[in-house]
Amino acid sequence: LSPKEYFVLTANYKGGSITVFSQDKKGKLQRDTKIIRFAGNGPNKKRQEQSHLHCVTFTPDGKFLLATDLGTDCIYLFPIGKRPEAGKAHSLLDESRVVRIQMDSGSGPRHICFHPNGRFAYLISELSGKITVFSYNEGKLERLQTIVCDPFVAEGNADIHVSSDGKFLYASKHLKEDGIIVYSIDSQKGTLVQIGFQPTGLYPRSFAISPDGCYLAVVCRDANCIQIFERNRNTGLLKLSLIHISEPTRH
C-alpha cells in the first residue's frame, strides 16, 4: 500500500514484474494499472534463469519504493513521482530515475524490511543464506554488516521482520534445520547478534508479529499448519503456544 493509500503494488515472481493498481476512496481496485517489467538472470541456472521480483516496500520517509529481484541479484530503488494522482497508476513511480543496487552474485535477494526508527534496513537473501544490514538516508543504502543466517546454504532463507520496539529481528529459514533465527539489534549501529533459534514445523515461509508484540505466527507450508509462538518482549525469545491452525495459506 502506497504512503497516501492511492495505490496497491505487487511483486510478481514468475512474471518478473511489478504491478501498480489504483484504488478508489473505498479501497476498491480500479482497472487502471501500470506494469513495470524487468529482464536479466543470475549465475544460479535453476533459480535465476530470469528476473524474479520477490518483494516491494516503501521507504519509511515515503519517498522511494524498493523492489528486490531474486533472479538478477538486484534491489531497484524507484523515486516516487512528483505529483502522484489518485486513479492514475503511471503517476506513482518515476521510472526515469530508477537506481539499480547490485548485490552479491548468486545471493538471491528475497525480502527487505526497515527498522522502526527508519535509519536501518535489513535484507534477507534466499540463495546465499545471508542477511545484509544497511543504513538508510534519503534514498541511499550503505552496507553496514553481512552475516550468515543459514550456515548450510540450503537456499531456503525466507522472511524477515523487526519487532515494533526495534530491539529484535527475526528471520525464517527452511530446507535444513527449519526454524526462526532471533537476533538482537544494536540500537545505535543497527547491527545484529544472534541470540536464539526456534525450531518450527517443516518449511516455514512467511511469518508475522502480532500488533501487541506478544505473539509470532509462522506459516509452515509442508507441515500444513500455522504455529503460534509466545514472544518474550524482554528477551526476544520464542515459546511454542498451544494454539495450532491447520491447512494454512501461504501469507
Image (cartoon, rainbow, N blue to C red):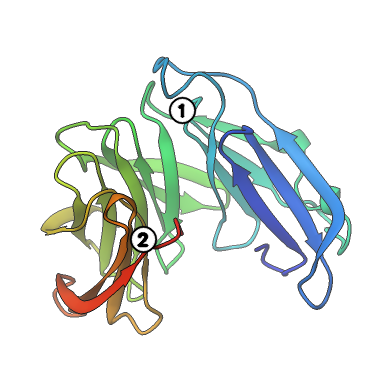
Which is nearer the eye, 153 or 5?
A: 153
* Whether residue 189 can be seen here: no
Residue 236 sits above or below residue 50 on the image: below
Which is nearer the eye, 228 or 139?
A: 228
Q: Point out the image quarter for the N terminus.
A: bottom right
8 displayed left or right of 161 = right
Residue 225: x, y in percent?
A: 31, 63
48 displayed left or right of 159 = right
Residue 98 sits above or below residue 169 on the image: above
* Whether residue 153 can be seen here: yes
For disc 1, the neighbor class at 10 Å (few under 14, some 14 to 19, many from 20) is: many
Which is nearer the eye, 1 or 193?
A: 1
Label 2 sits on residue: 161
Label 2 element class: strand
The answer for how far apart the CA atoms under marks 1 and 2 are is: 21 Å
Q: Residue at x 19, y 78 (%)?
A: 241
225 displayed left or right of 103 = left
Residue 129: x, y in percent?
A: 26, 36
Label 1 sits on residue: 73
44 displayed left or right of 91 = left
Q: Which amino acid does the dot numbered 1 rest on? A: Asp
Q: Which amino acid does the dot numbered 2 rest on? A: His
Residue lying farthest bottom? Answer: 212
Label 1 element class: loop
Mark 1 or mark 2, earlier in chain = 1
State the image quarter where residue 194 is shown. Answer: bottom left
Residue 41: x, y in percent?
A: 52, 18
State the image quarter where residue 104 is shown. Answer: top left
